Image: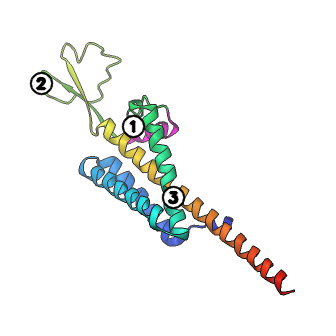
Amino acid sequence: MNSHLQVSLRELLFLVLFAAIGLASLRAGGVVASIVVMLAIVATMCFAILAFVGRHSIQAFAIGFLLPVIVYVAAILVVGKSELDPYAGKLPTSRLLRPMFRLMVKPTWTDMSTGQVVPDYDPDTDPGGYGAAPMAFSESLDRRTFMSLGHVLFAMMFGYAGAKFAVAVHREQQEIQSRSRERMDAGELH
């Protein structure tokens, strides 16, 4: 089965492109993130159709893609909204997204009385606010958007891995059936 799990150069380039677009969309958020999510939804719908109307390796690929995606999305839904906060998420994927969130999302503290951004403000050392001024916290990207997109990217990654595995198993079964037919045909001829 090892030969069936090989990745072609085209697939490798596609995976690198997917990772680059995924990381860029995590960083950019907004419209870019919305486009990536919409593309993931369209891809999932296409694979759902192929799971029903496709045959042979194409059908195996589609089913192998859909099952991990569905299981992962179900796990996110069961665990709940905590998975949309990088600091409260319990799933391993949420914990993997946490350091990326810290690197990509810039926290900003603003003095509400002046509207000025306060650099290097630490609320732990000044719990009453910047002097006597109330402080407002904001982040360059919304946590829910970042985490939702991160989970969509993980779902696509799991889907791809499941699809590759399903095709490998399908091809292995085809080879076993072919060898079995050859033996039966050889036995009938003697």
| Numbered badge on residue 71 | none
Q: Could you say which quadrant of the image residue 187 lies in?
A: bottom right
**In the rendered image, which residue does mark 1 sit on?**
102
Q: Is residue 44 on the magenta stretch? A: no
181 is higher (above) or lower (below) than 135: below
Cβ–Cβ under 8 Å for marks 1 and 2: no
Q: Give the residues in magenta.
A: 91-104
Callout 1, which amino acid? Arg
* Side of 167 relative to 14 (left or right): right
Determine the residue positioned at 43% across, 56% down: 19
| Numbered badge on residue 114 | 2
Determine the residue positioned at 41% across, 31% down: 80
Callout 2, which amino acid? Thr
Callout 3, which amino acid? Ile
**In the rendered image, which residue does mark 3 sit on?**
63
Q: Which badge, 1 or 2, is on the more N-terminal residue?
A: 1
**How would you rate the neighbour count of disc 3 (Cα within 10 Å): few for under 14, some for 14-19, many for 20 or more?**
many
Q: Which badge, 1 or 3, is on the more N-terminal residue?
A: 3
Q: Position of residue 70 (x, y in %)?
A: 47, 47
